[in-house]
């Protein structure tokens, strides 16, 4: 059965399931020995790598957060399973709260060199994205409490939107060295993706306002709400049997400044740069679900909230006039721009600056977006071992400090584990783990 509640409560489901993360593989992708994992942010990394070949077995990365909840992780640890998000978490309600989460499963994938100047990779992934933007925090709280409140309240959610989308992708990555002259080196890469969409759910409302009368237990609202779901999509039992095809792409370039390089003594197994700069655009594309059911609700009415019972769709159907139609609905991928500056301090010690910026408008209907962030990450890097500690400033005002390590083919870490343990009001959290078989130069 379709449930609008899914778009709001999926965030809590992500937390309880412990499948949470921020931008994917925070700290790992800048590592010169990241191999396949670095291709998720810039496909040009496939060429001139430190590998003869790199084979990913399985990797999982996830991300989640909200500017509505603030969580003390130590309270969860000490609660022995008794932590209640509704009563124990700190809350920061506004007329424009946001919830966001994504999970990225990197499946069997491999990369190898075609020639000294070109390389190729085949990458398989399963991804899930969730965004809900500009929802009234007070309205959300009362929906989750079944309007069990003795207080009146008003709300005004402009440009309310939400999208949950699940898809698989198979990517063909090609990279080539474009310039290799003395101190200057430039390479480029592109990923062409064949997408298989499992489906999605989406809502949007340009202007949703209302007042709750606690004495009469009535909710008076104005505006219009559109709710859509792709054909045969069951958010309680997601499968990949009925898939919809689509296409996507990534493109990226990397420049390296290589002073004082002795070309006779330095080989491809060495890092040659003093400064590396990369730029890329990822997730260009969309999936068009041809037979989506779209319901439009006229919210200009007064509803009896005394019998609200957690089923938002039933509440809407019973209290508001609606029309239903079958339409083709295109869900956009979370297109983003990525920038990297990586500086070699000395020997095996590096520091990097990364930015991840969404190219999808926050309130764009039928679309997902990444959380904008800036990350500064010092690291100790060797062929068989790397250690990094990223510090990030994330959209919606959250600070994240994490740690991670790579030991040969095993990588594990989090871009926020340290700040999660130290902060009283954590708003984002993440974790990743991966296993691969590296074949070094």
Image: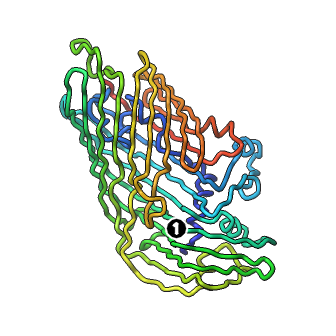
Against 50, is 314 above or below?
below
Residue displayed at 36% across by 30% down? 438
Residue nearest the viewer, comparing 130 with 166:
130
Q: Label 1 belongs to which residue?
A: 159
Percent x, y of residue 9: 61, 62
Q: Quadrant of residue 346?
A: top left
Q: Quadrant of the N terminus?
A: bottom right
Residue displayed at 53% across by 79% down? 224
Residue displayed at 69% across by 79% down? 219
Q: Quadrant of the C terminus?
A: top left
Percent x, y of residue 296: 50, 81
Is residue 400 toward the left or the right of residue 387 in the image? right
Are there few (<14), some (14-19), or many (20+) residues within 10 Å of tag 1?
Answer: some
Against 268, is 224 above or below?
below
Against 295, is 125 above or below?
above
Against 309, is 426 above or below?
above
Residue nearest the viewer, comparing 154 with 236:
154
In the rendered picture of this protein, how many numbered marks are placed on residues?
Answer: 1
Is residue 86 toward the left or the right of residue 188 in the image? right
Percent x, y of residue 386: 47, 25
Percent x, y of residue 392: 54, 38
How did the renderer colour the structure? rainbow
Q: Secondary structure at mark 1?
A: strand
Q: Quadrant of residue 120?
A: top left
Is residue 108 toward the left or the right of residue 14 in the image? left
Is residue 262 toward the left or the right of residue 431 in the image? left
Residue displayed at 54% across by 61% down? 133
């Amino acid at each position: 059965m379709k449930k609008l509640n899914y778009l709001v409560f999926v965030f809590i489901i992500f937390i309880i399931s412990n499948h949470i993360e921020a931008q994917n593989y925070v700290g790992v992708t800048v590592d010169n020995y990241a191999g396949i994992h670095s291709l998720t942010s810039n496909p040009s990394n496939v060429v001139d790598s430190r590998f003869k070949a790199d084979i990913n077995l399985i990797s999982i990365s996830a991300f989640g957060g909200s500017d509505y909840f603030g969580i003390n992780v130590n309270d969860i640890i000490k609660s022995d399973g008794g932590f209640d998000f509704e009563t124990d978490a700190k809350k920061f309600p506004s007329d424009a709260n946001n919830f966001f989460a994504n999970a990225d499963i990197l499946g069997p994938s491999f990369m190898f060199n075609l020639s000294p100047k070109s390389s190729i990779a085949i990458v398989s992934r399963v991804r899930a994205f969730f965004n809900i933007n500009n929802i009234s925090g007070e309205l959300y709280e009362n929906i989750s409490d079944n309007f069990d409140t003795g207080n009146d309240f008003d709300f005004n959610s402009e440009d309310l939107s939400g999208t949950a989308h699940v898809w698989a992708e198979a990517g063909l990555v090609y990279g080539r060295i474009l310039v290799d002259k003395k101190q200057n080196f430039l390479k480029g890469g592109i990923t062409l993706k064949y997408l298989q969409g499992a489906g999605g759910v989406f809502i949007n409302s340009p202007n949703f306002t209302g007042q709750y009368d606690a004495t009469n237990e009535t909710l008076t609202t104005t505006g219009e709400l559109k709710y859509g779901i792709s054909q045969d999509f069951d958010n309680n039992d997601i499968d990949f049997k009925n898939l919809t095809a689509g296409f996507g792409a990534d493109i990226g370039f990397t420049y390296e400044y290589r002073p004082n390089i002795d070309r006779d003594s330095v080989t491809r197994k060495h890092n040659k740069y003093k400064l590396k700069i990369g730029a890329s655009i990822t997730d260009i594309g969309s999936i068009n679900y041809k037979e989506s059911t779209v319901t439009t609700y006229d919210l200009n009415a007064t509803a009896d909230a005394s019998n609200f019972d957690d089923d938002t769709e039933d509440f809407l159907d019973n209290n508001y006039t609606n029309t239903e139609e079958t339409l083709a609905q295109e869900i956009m991928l979370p297109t983003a721009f990525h920038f990297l500056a990586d500086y070699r301090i000395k020997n095996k010690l590096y520091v990097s600056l990364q930015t991840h910026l969404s190219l999808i408008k926050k309130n764009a209907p039928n679309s997902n977006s990444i959380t904008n962030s800036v990350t500064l990450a010092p690291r100790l890097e060797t062929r068989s071992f790397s250690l990094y500690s990223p510090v990030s400033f994330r959209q919606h005002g959250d600070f994240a400090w994490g740690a991670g390590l790579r030991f040969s083919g095993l990588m594990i870490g989090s871009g926020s584990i340290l700040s999660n343990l130290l902060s009283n009001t954590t708003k984002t959290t993440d974790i990743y783990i991966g296993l691969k078989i590296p074949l070094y130069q």
